Image: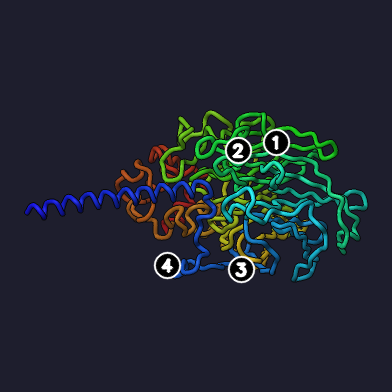
Amino acid sequence: MARQTRNSGDGRRSGFGVGLCIAALVALIAGLVAKNPEKFDFSDAPGFAALTGAHGDGVGPRLSSTLYDISVEKISAPMDAGEGGAIESFDDDLYLITRLGEFHRLKDGKTAFEAIALAPPSDVLRENFFYSRAKDFTSLGYKDLKLRHAGKDIEITVSQARVDRENACVGIVVSQAILSRNALDNGGASPEWREIWRSKPCIKSAGGSFPFQSGGDMAFLDDGRLAIFVGDFGVDGHNRKTAGVNPQTLDNDYGKVIAIDAATGASEILSRGHRNPGGLAIGPDGALWQSEHGAQGGDEINRIVAGGNYGWPLETYGVHYGARRWPLDDTTGDHDRFTRPVYAFVPSMAMSSLAPVKGAEFPLWRGDLMLGTLKYKRLMRLHIREGRVIFAEPLLLGARVRDLTVDDRGAIYVKDDVRPFVYRLTNGGGAAPVAGTPDALFAAAGCAACHDGSSLAPTLANLYGRDIASASGFQYSSALAGKHGVWDSDALRAFLTDPQRFAPGSTMPAPDMTEAQIEELVAALEG
């Protein structure tokens, strides 16, 4: 018996040790995810499809939306592994720069990219210098590309996350060159690149400050200045602290939107309190719009106002990875001390590029913004009216979107983040959901932004008569989970009219609908 007792005690001690190991492993994984959450999307890993039913390349020849049936053309494109590279529509052609700085062009009417023999401003670091892990290098490189007419010549502007070898530090550098049309068409010349701006201070490595949240998206303002979105480089004041880097203070360029005078190099901080840049674009209202990665949750769409402070890292709708709060935010779950985002996505979608819809290809979308996502492999059509995002319609492309652009005719081009493709989206002219049908009503009301068959929210199929908060696999608010009864006409009408009154604490936003539209939607849900 004594031996058995000792063995039992040893077993308990062994179990306790295993528990400690598991806890330590969980903490380690949470820390790794916190440093680079985008890297923890394993949907493209071998064997993942067999386990989950997901498919590596879900991009098909057609894409459905509320108003259009969309044709998707897959075009083979050059790319380098890692986070970077960009596409830009200019005149009738599409231009591409890889992460490592190679230039390519897709001529109007052609089906393949061709290389342009133009040397970039500088080489991208490839050897083990400054950073200790190979993956850190894949965030270095060229981030964005802009082309504009300069008289008879072409102005080309690029942004780059670049290492300063001499000082062993990293930052964002913007370079510009003027090329003749012949040089752009045929290459073979070495452009006279001029550095017009460099972020300050240059960030020293302090326990692993690396450029996976560097940003670099650019947009030209109406006054001719160049706006650039610079990330916090992972220096959030909690996971990592580095001297001279703080999104809240005005003595550095990180976690900021900067306006640059390309002629003089003079710069001005337009806004601060930003985290990890997604996209930057001039919206249909002429304002500067921005998409931004939150932490775990809290991806933001912001309308940039000069002098605005958007809160990071002191305030966010997101939380710390593996936790229920963000440690630096005393008002976790709200955003009332700093400028609120125009729209926020909870949970996060890992937002990327942002571009205004224009041209004649999708006339009913004009005035909207197109947003790319990485994690959820979709485009989001942001319906913009009077400075607000009325709804976000998901377009289930099936590819991680690194960059996107819209040409003058209105065709949408999407650069894949992990596969060597660019997708061209045009109006397929086929059938779209018929007005007045449930599918059309759900999309028009914004329901399809979350209730799209993904893990965001339960499906609306056969909702009528179902017990409230009964779908498995979803986290309901405590108020909604405590509701009794079924989704009948009265419950649906009350919930759609005022979600917070029906279930205080509900995560569902109030739909922007009239009483008549709510009645129409309830009738559609009744079937």
- Residues marked 2 and 4 touching at CB (< 8 Å): no
Compare marks 3 and 1 and give the one earlier in the sequence.
3
- What is the CA distance from the residue labelled 4 to the residue labelled 3? 26 Å
| Amino acid type at mark 4 | Leu
Compare marks 2 and 4 and give the one earlier in the sequence.
4
Quadrant where the image shows the N terminus: bottom left
Q: Secondary structure at mark 3?
A: strand
- What is the CA distance from the residue labelled 2 to the residue labelled 3? 36 Å
Which numbered marker is on residue 51? 4
Write down the residue under mark 1: 200
Q: Secondary structure at mark 1?
A: loop
Compare marks 2 and 1 and give the one earlier in the sequence.
1
**142 or 504, which lies in front?**
142
- What is the CA distance from the residue labelled 2 to the residue labelled 4? 37 Å
* Rendering colour mode: rainbow
- Above/below status of 24 relative to 47: above
Quadrant in the rendering for residue 100 = bottom right
Write down the residue under mark 2: 274
- Above/below status of 113 relative to 400: below
Question: Is residue 163 something one can see in this rendering?
Answer: yes
Q: Is residue 110 left or right of residue 241?
A: right
